[in-house]
Amino acid sequence: MGRAISKPVSANDVARYLGLPALASDVEIRSIAAVDEAVAGALSFAKSGPWAEKAPAGAVVIVSPEHAALVRGHALVSPTPRLDFARALAYIEETAGYVWSQAEPDIHPTAFIGQNVVLGKGVVVGEGARILHNVVIQDEVTIGARSIIKSCAVVGEDGFGFERDVDGKALRLPHLGRVIIEDDVEIGSLTTVCRGTLGDTLIRRGAKIDDHVHIAHNVDVGEDAFVIACAEISGGVRIGAQAWVAPNASVLNQLKIGEKAIVGLGAVVVRNVDDKSIVAGNPAKHIRHVE
């Protein structure tokens, strides 16, 4: 998955804008993607060596000098890859723009839409789904069959993604992904589910998310998992099938919560949680395994 650009952009034009060395042979950038989802003509960035190795031939990757040799595609060498990637996205947005759906919402005739609901372009609402009052669903969100979005939830807004420039000013990283909500999901009142930065935020079949929960960009909530009131799930977290995240728990970005794991009340999770592990405390520690 990636975000197409409205018209091709020269990689060397991007390099000049960023003040980086030009490629020996210029190429066209036609889309933006995460490095592990990139294709030929996509622009991405690599935050480490293992990520640099994921880039396919033909992709353009903003990468640090020490990892440039690992890129099989075209390397734009930068001392600050994530910052320059954010700058590149802003430049492309200004000079070319991104392709977003302009389609009117596709609402199944059996779905229920409450009062004062806002549905963005390209939204899909499946069979028997229920979108209750005052919900905001932003562009290109998919809501599966029989899923319920309770009152005042917000789905598909940008997540919290910023990089500081050399002067310490915050530069927003555009969010170009989507939110995919599968069948039989429940999203509670006043819960926020942010769109992905590059890839998608995914709420899998049967997952239940309580009121006042924050689901950050690129989170993957597994099938039949529970995320309970006031929990905060940071960017890129993977929650396994049938896991249970208790009220007021916080999970650090990019971690994995295993299948059937239990995260206790108010736990602060700073490392991965194994399958069927029960963790609690601050920082969260293993207590025992689920029997």
Image (tube, helix red, strand yellow):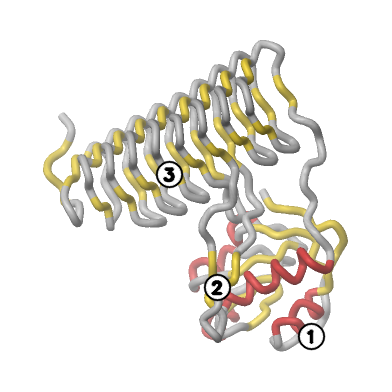
What amino acid does circle 3 point to? Answer: His
What amino acid does circle 1 point to? Answer: Ala
Q: Residue furthest front?
A: 116
**Label 2: how many Cα within 10 Å (few below 14, some 14–19, many 20+):** few
What amino acid does circle 2 point to? Answer: Ala
Residues tagged 3 and 2 counted as in contact (Cβ below 8 A): no
Q: Taking 276 as reference, is 142 left or right?
A: right
Q: Residue at x 62, y 55 (%)?
A: 175
Image position of 274 with respect to 81: above or below: above
Q: Position of residue 8 (x, y in %)?
A: 86, 64
Question: Which of marks 2 and 3 precedes in the sequence?
Answer: 2
Question: Which of marks 1 and 2 precedes in the sequence?
Answer: 1
Image position of 233 with respect to 142: above or below: below
> Which residue, given by chain and number where applicable, does mark 1 sit on?
24
> Mark 2: which secondary structure?
strand
Estimate the spatial distance between the alpha carbons at disc 3 and disc 2, rounded to whole Å: 22 Å
Which is nearer the eye, 175 or 238? Answer: 175
Q: Position of residue 44 (x, y in %)?
A: 65, 66
Q: Residue at x 54, y 67 (%)?
A: 162
> Which residue, given by chain and number where applicable, does mark 3 sit on?
214
**Label 3: how many Cα within 10 Å (few below 14, some 14–19, many 20+):** many
**Label 1: how many Cα within 10 Å (few below 14, some 14–19, many 20+):** few
Q: Taking 113 as reference, is 201 left or right?
A: left
> Which residue, given by chain and number where applicable, does mark 2 sit on?
170
Image-quadrant location for residue 77 = bottom right
Q: Nearer the viewer, mark 2 or mark 1?
A: 2
Q: How many marks overall?
A: 3
